[in-house]
Image (spheres, rainbow, N blue to C red):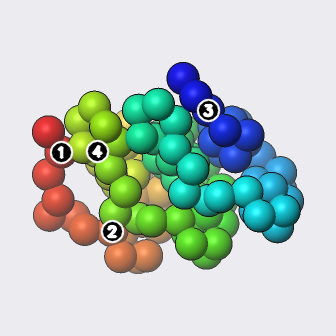
Amino acid sequence: SGWTVLIAASYNGQTEVASLLIDYKVDVESKDDGDWTALHVAARKNHRETAQLLLERGADIKAVTLDNQSTALHLAAEKGHKKTMGLLLRKGADHTSQDA
């Protein structure tokens, strides 16, 4: 899968770990083999606090996955994560973008 430690921390909702990693200059935009970022994973898993941290630290809200060209908003919407969707929309996610 090619996960970085930041993606793994985001998958598990470990916001403090993610913050520490970013403090140590781990790339907030690192991607796995499918172009998933830590923000994609946090949104998909409904880890709103982690997603907020990533956005505050420079995560690209417009980044898309390789397979379906999905944004973090698409991934949160697929799972019905309304509060995470609200966060992403407040932070400027494009609700008109389309996946593949």
Whole-percent x and y of residue 47?
60, 48
Mark 4 — residue?
Answer: 70
Sooner in the amino-acid sequence: mark 1 or mark 3? 3
Please name the amino acid that badge 2 sits on: Ala
- Placement of the N terminus among the 4 image quadrants: top right
The quarter of the picture where residue 51 lies is bottom right
- Other-residue count near label 4 (Cα within 10 Å), few / some / many at <14 / 14–19 / ≥20: many
Give the secondary structure at mark 3.
Answer: loop
Q: Nearer the viewer, mark 1 or mark 3?
A: 3
- State the residue position of label 3: 3
In the rendered structure, which disc, 2 or 3, sits on the residue that comes first in sequence?
A: 3
Please say if 53 is above or below 72.
below
Q: CA distance from mark 4 to mark 2?
A: 12 Å
Q: Residue furthest top?
A: 1
- Looking at the rendered structure, the secondary structure element under dot 4 is loop
> From mark 2 to mark 3, how far is it between C-alphas?
24 Å
